[in-house]
Image (spheres, helix red, strand yellow):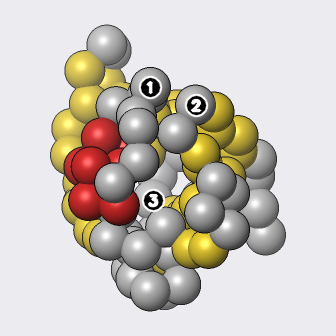
Amino acid sequence: MSAITTHVLDTGQGRPAAGLLVRLELVIGADGAVLAAGTTDDDGRIGSLGPDRVCPGTYRLVFNTAGYFARTGQPCFFPEVSLSFVVADPEQRHHVPVLLSPFAYSTYRGS
C-alpha cells in the first residue's frame, strides 16, 4: 500500500467520486515534482498512489475536479483542488480524504 492515499466522496451526488484524476507531488520551493498519478476507483479511492515509503517533507495532492464535474454533468467552481501537507514521520501512513461538491470541498487527515 502507498504511504499516501486518498478517498474522494461527491457529497452533492451522495456517492463516491469515481474516475477523478489525482496527482501526487513532492513540493520543492514553489514547484512540485510529480511522484505519481492515479484515478479514483468505483469507491472513490486510490490505494496505490506513489511509493510505499516517503521521506519527510511537504507533499501536494492535486485533484482534477474540472474533468470529474464535466464528465458527471455538474457545474464546476473549483476546477482544481490542491492540498499541501507535511509528512513529519515517514513511518506513518498519510490518508487525505476529500468531501467534494460543485461549489465547496473539505478535507482532513484520515486514518
Up/down of 83 relative to 95, above or below: above
Task: Report the disc number at residue 40.
Answer: none
The image position of residue 110, as x and y in percent, is 76, 61
Query: Distance from label 2 to label 3 (Cα)?
Result: 32 Å
- Comparing marks 3 and 1, which lies closer to the viewer? 1
Name which quarter of the figure residue 77 lies in.
top left
Q: Badge 3 local density, few (<14 within 10 Å), some, or many (20+)?
A: many
Q: Badge 2 local density, few (<14 within 10 Å), some, or many (20+)?
A: few
Dot 1 falls on a residue whose secondary structure is: loop
Horizontal side of 4 relative to 66 (left or right) equals right
- Name which residue type carries label 3: Val
Residue under numbered circle 3: 54
Which sits in the foreground, 103 or 87? 103
Dot 3 falls on a residue whose secondary structure is: loop
Residue under numbered circle 2: 103
- Name which residue type carries label 2: Phe
Q: Sequence-wise, which precedes: disc 1 or disc 2?
A: 1
Q: Sequence-wise, which precedes: disc 2 or disc 3?
A: 3
The residue shown at (63%, 33%) is 104
Are circles 3 and 1 on residues that touch, CB within 8 Å?
no
Q: Badge 1 local density, few (<14 within 10 Å), some, or many (20+)?
A: few
Q: Quadrant of the C terminus?
A: bottom right
The image position of residue 33, as x and y in percent, is 21, 38
Are circles 1 and 2 on residues that touch, CB within 8 Å?
yes
Q: Is residue 9 visible from the viewing direction of this image?
A: no
The residue shown at (68%, 68%) is 14
Dot 2 falls on a residue whose secondary structure is: loop
Query: Distance from label 1 to label 2 (Cα)?
Result: 5 Å
Task: Report the disc number at residue 77.
Answer: 1
The image position of residue 105, as x and y in percent, is 64, 38
The image position of residue 97, as x and y in percent, is 65, 58
Name which quarter of the figure residue 28 lies in.
top left
